[in-house]
Amino acid sequence: MTGTRFQELISRNQARLSTRRKIVNAIMLSLTGVLTLIALVPLFWIVGYVLYKGGASLNLAFFTQLPRPLGMEGGGVLNAIEGTLVISTLACILALPLGVLAAFYAERFPNTPLGVTLRFSTDVLSGVPSIVIGLFAYALVVKPQGHFSALAGGVATAILMLPTIIRTTEEMLKLVPRTLREGSLAIGAPEWKTSLNVVFPAAISGIITGFLLSISRAAGETAPLLFTALGNERYDVGSIINSGIAQKQGLLQIINRVIDQPADSLPLTLWKYAQQPYPERIRESWAAALVLMIIILLINIFARLWVESRKRALRG
Amino acid sequence: MQETNTAISNEVSPTTTSEYKVQTKNLSVYYGKFRALAEINLSVLQNKITAIIGPSGCGKSTLLRSFNHMNDLTPSAHSQGEILLDGENINETGVDVVEVRRRIGMVFQRPNPFPKSIYDNVAYGPRLYGIRRKNDLDEIVEKSLRQSALWGEVKDKLHQNGFSLSGGQQQRLCIARAMAVEPEIILMDEPASALDPISTLRIEELMHDIVKEYTIIIVTHNMQQAARVSDFTAMMMIDDQRAGRMIEFNETQIIFTNPKDKRTEDYVTGRFG
Amino acid sequence: MSRFSKISRQNPRFNRLQKKIRYGDIPWQVIIILMSIVIIIVMISIGWMLWRDSSTSRTEFGWSFILPTANATWDPVNSIFQSWPFIYGTLLTSVTAIILAVPVSLGIAIFLAELCPVSLRMPLNWLVELLAAIPSVIYGLWGIFVFLPTVVAPVGVFLLNTLGHIPGINILFTGPVPESGSSRIAAAFILMIMIIPTISAVTRDVLLSIPSDQREAAMALGATKWESIWQVILPFGMSGILGAVILGLGRALGETMAVTMVIGNSIEGTPSLLRPGYTMASIIANEFAEAVTTLHTEALIEIGLTLFFITLLLNIIARLLVWSVARRTTQEARA
């Protein structure tokens, strides 16, 4: 076989092939850019529509009043806003300590039997559909108590947030350079002080970001609340607190009254109203969507800016 | 700092009647505003092994990658000056880069076989150019693997994954892959630096065998290797503005025993670098 | 002897402090171990609870509950429950969504990982992630009032008139298309939009983790950029990409609100994409809060159990696949 055999084999169609290959190259590469743009169309479409339809119905009463019966003017979704706040706060109180502490174990001992099982469980939990988690919270809280409650909703939401919190905390802890931990241990500081006073503060900005992102996800969830918090058009934390003070109830009692009854949330209200055939309710759906969207976008933007500013601070 | 570029063409007397296979004329390469290579003039003779040596960071790899337009993969890179392949400038806009890369092949520092079978690794190039018939491909694969002295070791396991080979074998596989499209020039960027001494020697023997059909330009930081293997050596260094320059270029014998430039002498005798 | 150790011997308070600090290690370890155990218990409890609270339904109906049945019944009044229509609806909408989403996601991932100018990369990544941050209910709301009338209904009619005539696949495209557009294909479209961020983000990361000398080797042989991507890079990352797709599938299967709002929630028998349907998540969402009989509740929980198993399995497979690309990359680097 001579050296020009290759040339023999290709010279016949090389010219044609070259152009064809170049055309294919150009088409396919630009296709990927086009697809990216197309994929972003729904984003702008949805956000635009929510702004447009929701903005028209937004007024002060929307934020400060409870829903009024159909036919009456005014009314708002105060119950939903307060419900969202209460449930989210509950979820944070439950999920944060649990998740962060477990993440400490996962990062420090990833290969022990407990560590492997823990990381496996986190993976499993992250894949469980939110409605199944709602079923679980129902069995755990609602059935024994005999009634729906914000507490049950909080539990469901907390389970939803756990995997994200654990995973991001673990990642952030891993990013802390070993030299930092070793430096602390070398001085004679015990493990736990090292973890709490040295490693944790170094990772905290990332942990906060992960936490914020998990909240933004949790705030928008509806399915787990369908049969835990259920919805409550008369949910009014303000009046509960006022009446509690008037009746001289203790702090714990007041808190109990707040969390122990069914509650609403923005996504729940959205869903309920969207299914009703009344135009006023539909308009309120869009308005609720707008409020929800703004909250979520704000959290996301804030989290991004936070990450960027920390990165810049580190680069110095 | 003195530049002895002008001395180059005079030093190499055309006792061989082969012309220059590839030449650079005042080649400068920039990354953005930073000039990485300054006015390189290098003339490479056909069917010879030319080594490029110099301290690390002096732009040897950048120079090598200019020949086959691999620097184009870095967005901020741009260049001035000519690169002549058989007398034609391939450093202009509008040049068919794909064609250039077929005629100038490259072997990298770390072996990088594709996650395909040994056969498919070598056949990848020919298939790109439209060769489809099994007989033709079989022929090319066997020839390339024989040329890279790997055929005996793999002929019974051509369908195993390329990664199942040892480091030295993987590198010879990459050489076979580069040769399968029958380039005219083979660029080698420190081809043996990731290998053990025995594999290194094998590769050096390989270079001696294939230079009859190819022109080889090798970048190496290993001076003994350059002395063993090459016919001509180019010495590079960075100047005050951290741009790489060609300091001296001559037959390897002369560079290593009787260099004209003091800096070359310091480098090859190990006084620095 | 150093001054430091002299001090510790002389000062009893210091010794007590030392002991306290060292013993602090134990409570700390206990706490974090405890928290980890709680999480594992949560996971196990979910599975156990689903199993336990569906026992009557399972014994009553056995395998016929989930096996494909023609003319399946779902009758809360007479307590006859067969869940095949929901399983079918879930599978059909999710698989269709995946088929539609994968090419788009691949394109996005390739663009973001290989082609995009670096300055655009961050903002574009962020925008695609924002798509994932929009709550499911808002997708549903937009779906009902905007997307379905504008896009889905016309597309449905178009498909009915074209693919509906091709023998073989036309069972999937029988009409009539509901006026509102609420149909399985509406759910598939919205699911597609919702899972694109998941699949493309993971794929993008997989592509970015592939060592660059693979690309360089292909291009040095004269391949065009597209050829190097399609013939070398994508095959290299194939298991990771597969993992990304499976993750997306898992997400699609569990998606509840948006699907419920646009799928029409009807158990009618035709297998067509263009007709209204029902999914496992939707039936639970719609009926659970009002279920009266225990058998009804348990049947719904059994559906939840099925859903749990499927997503569990997919999740495991996906993690293994994504992990295997990372492992191979480091393995080869060592070679």
Image (cartoon, rainbow, N blue to C red):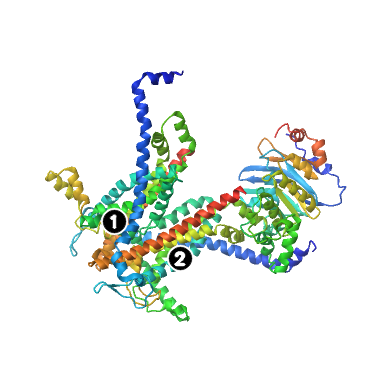
Q: Chain of mark 2?
A: C
Classify 10 Å Cα crowding around label 1: few (below 14), some (14-19), many (20 and above). many
Residue in front for this viewpoint, A156 or B47: A156
C57 relative position to C197: left or right: left
**Where residue B52 appears, x then y in whole percent?**
74, 43
**Where residue B102 appears, x then y in whole percent?**
71, 58
| Dots 1 and 2 on the same chain | no
Name the mark on residue C98. 2
Q: CA distance from mark 1 to mark 2?
A: 30 Å
Q: Chain of mark 1?
A: A
Given the image, on which type of amino acid does mark 1 rest?
Answer: Ala
Q: Which residue is mark 1?
A: A137
B146 relative position to C117: left or right: right
Given the image, on which type of amino acid does mark 2 rest?
Answer: Ile
Instruction: Look at the picture and state if B38 lies above or below A292.
Output: above
Classify 10 Å Cα crowding around label 2: few (below 14), some (14-19), many (20 and above). many
Point out the residue furthest to the left here: A247
Residue shown at 38% from the left, 74% from the top: C68
User: Residue C269 is drawn in which quadrant?
Assistant: bottom left
User: Residue A54 is drawn in which quadrant?
Assistant: bottom left
